[in-house]
Image (spheres, grey):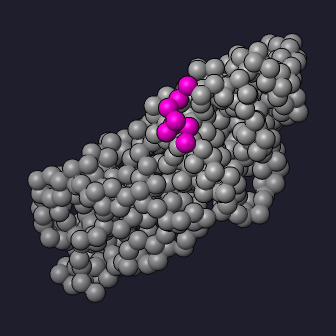
């Protein structure tokens, strides 16, 4: 049995860590596992079941250091090679030759064992490959880890590159003090670029120190205005700070333009401010800019740009970006379809507690996509978001109990989880709950409730539910049908969206 995964339409925007404060036919069981959208979720789903019909499908030249930055080394550290065994020097040279002819995977294969054995130059070189995404997926966090190993051995080029990562907040939290420390260490070894970078950074820090106190105070005033709903005042404060280069204010101003809060909705202007903040390493802005590119809102629709900005944010640990990047790999949009890579990104976000990623990772385990099929692990990852109220995960857990996959078969438990999702308006759960009542499995058999849930599911677009409702109606009296229709109307009235 294959369990299919899918993504429903847009879920809507989500606040940032700075408290962006955005307010938040026969009747057969459908053998599907559902997955929801990710952070900000500005994408459409791929189709997942014949009963509902095909869904529309929507859906890395990342900013890297200049070539010179990564290739300059200091002659003093040639000593690191001279003390190595001849085989080590020869292995490094083979990697170097492979690198220069563009065979990055071979270069990595030669350098990796040397780096693991503590060779500083090889550690630096592995960091470069990860930093640039050459022969491996780009990963700033791993690049920083290898740069640090080499930097701590005194390798000046690694110190210089590590400083840049800290300066821009790529793979590590943005930290000008640490950037200055590593620039200074490289500069003390007469690294010319490090000397110049240190001079510019210290000048910038002096200016920022003079501006920091009033900027922080004004920013908090803006946040308080936003929280109380005074968006006009908030936009005025954030605009002034954004023009001074404050990345948090730039990102928030982008949110306000994207959602028309305190200003007229203007996606192009939102993209402009997101881009300014994104270039400073602001991960929320990077994620939001990537998603605007995905939808073509205010910018040209480009999957490559989407992947570029999502990867930048994901490498900084942004769970929403990690989930969206996983979706790109799962669906093969602008990247080669790679279920293992999709599962890897879902896991990173899932381990941070991001419910959509947890549900998607559960689906990967249920389907055996990118990971070995393991229904026990699927149950583990479905249960976490289900208990937090994610309707898709609640439906999936109900399906798992109904089929006895990784858990003892339990129709009553299945009905309980289907009901939780159905009460949130999740069409497939409403349909399956109707089947549960029609069959009398785990609940008393009652065609009235079956008819009601089929009707509600049909109202939400499930065509199979409409056919099932008509079938069960043949088993009911006219009075029972009228009562079931009344229950459906009352449910809709009670759950009417405000």
Which part of the image, by quadrant, shows the N terminus?
bottom left
Quadrant of res 208: top right
Residue 21 image position (x, y, % from top left): 63, 34
Residue 102 visible somewhere in the drawing: yes
Q: Is residue 293 above or below residue 124?
A: below
Quadrant of res 252: top right
Q: Is residue 22 above or below residue 311?
A: above
Q: Nearer the viewer, residue 83 or 124?
A: 83
In the image, taking residue 347 as reference, residue 146 lies left or right, namely right
Residue 213 image position (x, y, % from top left): 80, 13
Most frequent secondary structure within the magenta stretch: helix
Q: Which residues are magenta?
A: 83-90
Residue at horizontal 44%, vertical 78%? Answer: 53
Residue at horizontal 49%, vertical 28%? Answer: 118
Q: Residue furthest bottom?
A: 25
**Number of disc labels:** 0
Q: Nearer the viewer, residue 26 or 477?
A: 26
Q: Residue furthest front?
A: 86
In the image, taking residue 448 as reference, residue 326 lies left or right, namely right
Q: Is residue 213 above or below residue 274?
A: above
Residue at horizontal 79%, vertical 24%? Answer: 191
Residue 423 image position (x, y, % from top left): 35, 54
In the image, taking residue 434 as reference, residue 203 lies left or right, namely right
Q: Nearer the viewer, residue 418 or 274?
A: 274
In the image, taking residue 242 as reference, residue 354 lies left or right, namely left
Q: Does 346 appear in magenta?
A: no
Residue 311 visible somewhere in the drawing: no
Residue 6 image position (x, y, % from top left): 43, 65
Residue at horizontal 47%, vertical 77%? Answer: 54
Q: Is residue 128 above or below residue 427?
A: above
């Amino acid at each position: 049995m294959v369990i299919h995964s899918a993504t429903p339409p847009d879920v809507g925007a989500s606040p940032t860590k700075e408290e962006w404060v955005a307010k938040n036919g026969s009747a057969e069981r459908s053998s599907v596992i559902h997955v929801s959208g990710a952070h900000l979720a500005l994408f459409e789903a791929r189709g997942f079941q014949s009963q509902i019909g095909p869904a529309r499908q929507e859906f890395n030249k990342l900013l890297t250091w200049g070539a010179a930055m990564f290739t300059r080394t200091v002659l003093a550290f040639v000593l690191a090679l001279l003390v190595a065994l001849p085989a080590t020097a020869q292995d490094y040279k083979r990697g170097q030759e492979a690198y220069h002819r563009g065979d990055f995977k071979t270069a990595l294969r030669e350098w990796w064992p040397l780096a693991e054995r503590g060779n500083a130059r090889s550690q630096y070189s592995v960091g470069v490959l990860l930093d640039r995404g050459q022969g491996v997926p780009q990963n700033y966090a791993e690049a920083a880890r290898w740069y640090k190993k080499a930097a701590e051995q005194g390798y000046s080029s690694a110190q210089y590159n590590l400083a840049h990562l800290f300066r821009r907040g790529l793979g590590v939290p943005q930290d000008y003090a640490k950037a200055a420390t590593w620039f200074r260490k490289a500069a003390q070894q007469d690294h010319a670029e490090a000397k110049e970078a240190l001079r510019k950074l210290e000048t910038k820090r002096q200016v920022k120190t003079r501006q920091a106190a009033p900027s922080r105070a004004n920013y908090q005033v803006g946040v308080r205005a936003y929280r109380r709903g005074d968006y006009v005042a908030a936009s005025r404060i954030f605009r002034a700070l954004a023009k001074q280069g404050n990345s948090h204010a730039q990102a928030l101003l982008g949110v306000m333009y994207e959602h028309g809060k305190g200003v007229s909705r203007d996606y192009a202007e939102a993209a402009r401010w997101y881009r300014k903040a994104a270039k400073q390493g602001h991960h929320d802005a990077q994620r939001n800019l990537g998603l605007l590119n995905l939808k073509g809102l205010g910018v040209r629709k480009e999957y490559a740009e989407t992947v570029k900005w999502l990867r930048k944010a994901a490498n900084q640990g942004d769970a929403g970006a990690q989930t969206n990047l996983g979706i790109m790999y799962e669906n093969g949009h602008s990247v080669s379809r790679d279920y293992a890579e999709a599962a890897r990104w879902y896991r990173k976000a899932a381990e941070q507690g991001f419910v959509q990623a947890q549900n998607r990772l559960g689906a990967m385990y249920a389907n055996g996509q990118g990971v070995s099929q393991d229904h026990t692990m699927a149950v583990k990852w479905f249960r976490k978001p289900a208990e937090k109220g994610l309707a898709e995960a609640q439906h999936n857990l109900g399906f798992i109990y109904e089929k006895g996959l990784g858990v003892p078969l339990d129709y009553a438990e299945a009905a309980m989880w289907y009901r939780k999702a159905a009460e949130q308006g999740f069409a497939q759960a409403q349909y399956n709950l109707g089947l549960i009542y029609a069959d009398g499995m785990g609940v008393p058999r009652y065609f009235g409730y079956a008819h009601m849930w089929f009707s509600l599911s049909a109202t939400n677009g499930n065509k199979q539910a409409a056919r099932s409702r008509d079938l069960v109606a043949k088993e009911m009296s006219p009075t029972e049908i009228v009562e079931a229709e009344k229950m459906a109307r009352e449910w809709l009235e009670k759950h009417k969206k405000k």
